Each structure stands twice: as structure tokens, then as C-alpha cells.
Image (cartoon, grey):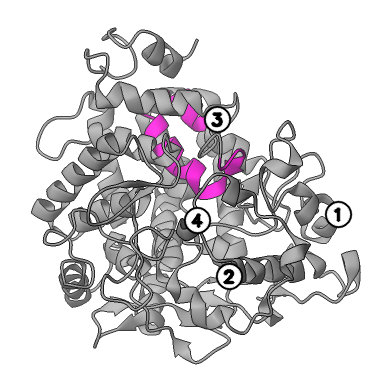
Amino acid sequence: MDRIAQLTARPTARDIAYDPPSVADSLHVRAARVLEANWTGASTVPSRSLYPHQWSWDSAFIAIGLRHVSPLRAQTELETLLAAQWGDGRVPHIVFNPSVPLDAYFPSPDFWRSSTAGRAAGAPRTVQTSGIVQPPVHALAAWLVHLADPVLSRARGFLPRMYPRLAAWHRYLLHRRDLGGGGLASVVHPWEQGMDNSPCWDAPLARVTPAPARSFRRADLDHGAPEDRPTDLDYGRYVRLATDYRDGGYTDGGNSGIKGAPRRASASAEGGGGTRAGEGDFAVEDPAFNALLIASEHALARIADELGATGTARRARAERLTAALVERLWDPAEGMFFCRDVRGAGLVPERSVSGLLPLLLPGLPRDIATDLVRTTTSEHFGLGTSTRLVPSYDLLGEAFDPHRYWRGPAWFNTNWLLERGLRTQGEHRRADALREAVLDIAQSSDFAEYVDPYTGEACGATGFSWTAALTLDLLHSPPLSPLHSPTETTAVNELKGGIRG
């Protein structure tokens, strides 16, 4: 029985996993029980009902929380995900559990056909995955997991095994996905950015002819109210984009001259007629996706230092990417970052929480950081005034809906990132208030997937893994008191050093 199983089985014991609280129904124990219930033996599902497989950025956030109760399980979480990495370096956004029925989730493995359609891109033969990606928060997660128990990490060779895979992942994004030519990574599907049906995608998606409704069945509507989920029209466009990418062999339109890049599949492969990502109708540079890539470059620099190499080149790359982010996505008149439609007319003038997440970056110019904090607390997002958690979309936007997925509700992972971002920029009072709000609302909502930004009402699934995991992380990182162990104190200090380069 590992530490997390011991904790949930005997919650009053105080000698387990970094001094857990003695109260049986404490928030700490309740969060650990969620992760235990969603554990499959090798990874953690986001939700037993709605998301029964392993998701990429979910697992990164889950590992960040798991490290506080079972560093071994946190390492295993990331190892399982990266074992499904493709030969071209991409980390797929879903790793499918073969024991789950095909009709439990759509798109299922028989839609993606990764081992055949993705053969030229190096898709694994022994596990089925999707062919698209999600935000690259994994190197940051790996570094934090290492810091939770460096002795265990070194004994298992965790970082030496993770580093080459993480470096290949970043290489794929920086070379194959620089579709705009300005140095930033592009997403080729709304699902890649993680904020699936954000209004930021409406204009780029309008160019996409939706797949016929009869050609697919939405399993998500079996578990969620239709008024809270993406519309059928949007879903048809998602399916069309994914189908075209698959039928083009999952090849990209970035720098094809990099060493070790896979041979592009012909348009006739696997059904023919598809287009490569770089040639399709949807290609968007997103501020959150690139901010997380930059933060993870800083983390890779720290990992390199730990392994006896030098992180100098990675720190320099993080600085160049930060400059590119500002040059391409910052709008000084609006005081925030916007998505850039690579195939369209430039910046997409929709205010999303994605445009606030570059607060994470220590290299952000001071005036830009100040403007971003002002926007976060403005009437558009209401932090500290009309809302306790930052909504996913502009409160005053025409598309705002407090319950419809990423078109208004508040999400715990983005607010966890913003809490860290506010601290990075020296906004400790606001960060403290946001931390308390995340903990309070996670508890009152039963660890909901997302919540109404005004009322905190639970939406989507409850018992959601990243909500529980990030609750644990905030509980173990109190802002004004010592952490529960010297290892954890070191972890926070090292993280600050790593992010600041």
C-alpha cells in the first residue's frame, strides 16, 4: 500500500506523507480520496464518468498535487504519459485505456487510428492515443515532482529518464509547430489549447466546414447538460479538423528540415484527401499555451543543472520566447494578450483567461505585468470585486455564459496558474486572496470540474482530479507560514529560482 492509499485508509495517522492533518474529514484527506478513487494503477483519470482515460495536461497538474502525498505515484503519472510519446516528440493529449469500452468516450481510439494513421510520425505501436497535443506544462510538473523527494527521484533515475523525452517534446513544438514563423508554437485544434470551446476560437473555426452530425455520436452529453457543453455545430467542426489531421498522417507544416523529423505522409495515406496541420484552416498562436512552454523551458534549465549539464541555452530560449510572445500577442491598448489567428486577420479580439496567464513569466516587462494585473481585477474579469475566481472569459463579452464550459465558468487549473503568476509579479495580497478562494470553492463544490464565477455553483463533473490535486498543492504551500517539511520549503525556493532562471 503506497502513501496515498494509507492516507485515505487511515486519515488520522500523522506519520504518513508529509504530516497530513489529523481531522478525518479535512480538505486534505478529501482531496486525497478523490485522487485515490480516480487512480487506475498507472495513471489518474480526470473523472471516472466523463473522462475515463489519461489526459495530458490533466496528468501534469495531477502529478503536481500527488507529489505531496505520494512522490512515487506522481513520478509514475508522468512516466506513464511520456511512455506514449510519439517518435516526432509530440505528447498526445489522450492515452487510451484498452479496458474502457469504445463507446464510453468520443473520439475513441478507432477514430484516431494512431498506430496506423500516425505511423510516419512515430506513433507507438503498443498503445492507442489521440494525434493532437495539449499545453506543455509537463517539464514544470517533472521538476516539482523531483523536488518533493529528491532522494527517491535520484534513486529511480527519474529526471535522467524524463529529460530526453521532455526535450524532444519542446523541440517538436518549437520546430514543427512554428506555423506563423514568429517563433511561437501554434495549436491546430481547439482541444490542443485545453480551453475547448473558448470564444477565441469562434472566428478561426468559422472557416471550417463541420462534419455531418450523423457521422459521430457525442458521449459527453450522456454525462453533462447540453446547455453546459459545446454546441453540435462547434463539435462538428472539431470532428472535421481532427479527421483532416488524421487523414493527412498527423504531419505538420513547420520546419521540415530539423534533424530526425519524420517523413511526411502523403495526402493519400489512411483515407487520403487530408491536409497537414500547417496547411489547414485552423492554426492559432495562443498566449497560455506559449506561456506554459516558456515556464517549462525554465524548468528544463533547472533539470539540466540538476543532471550536471548547463541550462544556459534553455534560459536564453525562454527569454527569446518571452520577447516573441510580447511582440506577437500583446495588445497595449487593451492591456492583455490575445490569440493570433495565423490563417486569418491577426489578433483575435476576445478577452480570455488565456491572455492573463503570461503573468507566470518572470521575464515579463514590468509595465506589461502591471497592466495584466489591472486587467485581471477590472470589470472584464472582476477578481476581488465581482468574482473570487477568475472566469474563463470576459464577463462583459457577448459570448459570456457562466455555465457553458470555457465560455465563462471559472476553472481551478487556470486560477492555480494565476495564483502563481500573481506571486511571481509580487502581488502577494491578491495571490493570498485567490488561494483562499480556490480552497474554499473547491471544498464547497465537492472538487468540481468548473464553477459559476459569480456563485461558485458546481458545474460539470464533481470529484475532478486536477481540482483535488491543485487543492493539495495550495494546502502544502501556505503563503505566510512554514511548509510541512524541509523538503517542501526547499521545493518552493528551488521553484522560485527555476522560474526566475
Pointer 4: residues within 10 angstroms few (<14), some, or many (20+)? many
Determine which residue is flagged by label 2: 234
CA–CA distance between discs 2 and 4? 25 Å
Q: Nearer the viewer, residue 115 or 138?
A: 115
What percent of the width, then of the height, locates residue 113?
Answer: 81, 53
Q: Earlier in the sequence, mark 2 or mark 4?
A: 4
Visible residue check, residue 165: yes
CA–CA distance between discs 2 and 3? 35 Å
Which labelled disc corresponds to residue 116? 1
The image shows residue 317, relative to residue 217, as above or below, that is: below
CA–CA distance between discs 1 and 2? 27 Å
User: Is 252 placed left or right of 56 in the picture?
Assistant: right
Pointer 2: residues within 10 angstroms few (<14), some, or many (20+)? many
Describe the element under mark 1 as helix, strand or loop.
Answer: helix
Q: Quadrant of residue 148?
A: top left
Q: Earlier in the sequence, mark 1 or mark 3?
A: 3
Q: Amino acid at mark 4?
A: Pro
Pointer 1: residues within 10 angstroms few (<14), some, or many (20+)? some
Q: Nearer the viewer, mark 1 or mark 2?
A: 2
Query: Start and end of the magenta stretch?
Result: 50-75
Q: Earlier in the sequence, mark 1 or mark 4?
A: 1
Determine which residue is flagged by label 4: 136
